[in-house]
Image: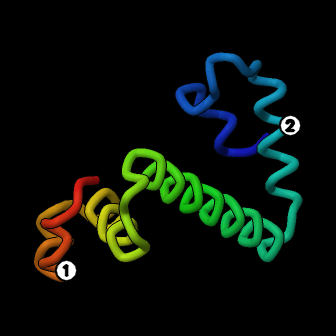
Amino acid sequence: MSKVSANPAVIPADTSPEVWRRQMDAIARRSIPDRLDEWAQLNRGVARMAEQAVRRRHPDYDDRQVFLALVRARYGDDLALRVWPDAAEVER
């Protein structure tokens, strides 16, 4: 039994403990490079969805404005505006 499955707080409400254990065991059997590759793919997918959401909300934004909106959303206004002062010109 994997360590994660012993903690019921992390088991999704719609998943039985047995199915959760099997899922965690299957992940644990995979190689580290395979798991890192999947992590990278998921991160790229989330980044694409975030960019698409900004472009849907602000169809008039050019690529720079989309980048600045994403920076503000990801890192917060305090840091984003210190590093990219022109980020103040865009909405998230």
Task: Give the color scheme: rainbow, by chain, secondary structure or one colour.
Answer: rainbow
Query: How far separated are the C-alphas under marks 2 and 1?
Result: 46 Å
Height in image: 85 above or below 17?
A: below
Residue 37, quarter of picture? bottom right
Nearest to the observer: residue 44 or residue 68: 68
Looking at the rendered structure, the number of numbered marks drawn on it comes to 2
How busy is the neighbourhood of tag 1: few (under 14 within 10 Å), some, or many (20 plus)?
Answer: few
Residue assigned mark 2: 22
Residue assigned mark 1: 84
| Residue type, mark 2 in image | Arg
Of mark 2 and mark 1, the one earlier in the sequence is: 2
**Which residue is rendered at x = 31% and y = 62% of the image?**
69
Q: Secondary structure at mark 1?
A: loop
Residue 13, quarter of picture? top right
Nearest to the observer: residue 17 or residue 57: 57
Nearest to the observer: residue 90 or residue 30: 90
**Which residue is rendered at x = 49% and y = 59% of the image?**
51
Quadrant (top left, top right, bottom left, bottom right) of the N terminus: top right
